[in-house]
Image: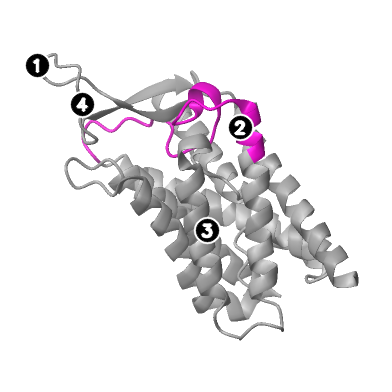
Amino acid sequence: MQKSLVAEFLGTFWLVFGGCGSAVLAAAYPELGIGFVGVAFAFGLTVLTMAYAVGGISGGHFNPAVSLGLTVAGRFPAARLVPYVVVQVVGAIAAAALLYLIASGKAGFELGGFAANGYGDHSPGGYSLLSALLIEVLLTMFFLIIILGSTSSRVPAGFAPLAIGLGLTLIHLVSIPVTNTSVNPARSTGRRFSLAAGRCSNSGCSGLRRLRVERSAGSHGNSSTTPTDRKITSYPLEPARFFSCGFFCFRGSAASSIWQSRRREG
């Protein structure tokens, strides 16, 4: 059990540090930024690599929604659910804290939204709460279907990490513009704590902010822009909005697991 918890901590840490780190440090780097596509692949690669590295020890959940879904589907002992969720959240918080320390070492660093999730003014594309709810529930449901299906005894062994990693990449390609993509309550919670800590240290907890990438006008007042002409703008972020993405993930996880269970019984 102890080895499994350590593996889940490391896997979730790597997912948050690698995925969110690519968004914070590399996505908008002048002229060479990796953009949405690069961030999507970064998240997929973190799951792919750690699923092969430690998946044989813990099962490679790295996500409370996955642990819950597997429990509902009867593929994971209920007694292990709470310890798994705890270490996943702790791993995410540790990764977010370390990422903050690294990112804040740059001259002129501004906390912004730190790759947090949101809707409305806090969505990269300005999408509504309904849009955020629908996409988070739907994509988390399909993520669990991919996991449950690819790890079934009826499919060739050894290929599950590929399917899961590529599935997560596709999920991010679809939903980064809508919510910045959660499908993982631990990932959302880790960012929430790092935001709160950063705001407290920098401005006396005067309010949380979130990143939004907008096209900026040309340096000579030209209204036309190119994809690299971007600026970071801050907007207030209420904690309730931040945690809503995690709730949507659990809903999608439970829905997919119930569907799989009924299918198996049928």
Q: Residues within 10 Å of mark 1 (few under 14, many from 20)?
A: few
- The type of residue carrying mark 1 is His
Q: Residue at x 53, y 36 (%)?
A: 179
* Above/below status of 43 relative to 229: below
Q: Earlier in the sequence, mark 1 or mark 2?
A: 2
Name the secondary structure under disc 3. helix
Q: Earlier in the sequence, mark 4 or mark 1?
A: 1
Q: Closer to the observer: label 2 or label 3?
A: 2
Q: Is residue 139 magenta?
A: no
Distance Cα–Cα, label 3 vs label 4:
31 Å
Quarter of the picture containing the C terminus is bottom right
Q: Residues within 10 Å of mark 4 (few under 14, many from 20)?
A: few
Contact between labelled residues 3 and 1, with CB atoms less than 8 Å apart: no
Mark 2, residue position:
131
Q: Earlier in the sequence, mark 1 or mark 3?
A: 3
Q: Residues within 10 Å of mark 3 (few under 14, many from 20)?
A: many
Quarter of the picture containing the N terminus is bottom right
Q: Earlier in the sequence, mark 3 or mark 4?
A: 3
Distance Cα–Cα, label 1 vs label 2:
37 Å
**Of the numbered discs in the image, which one, if any, rests on residue 225?**
4
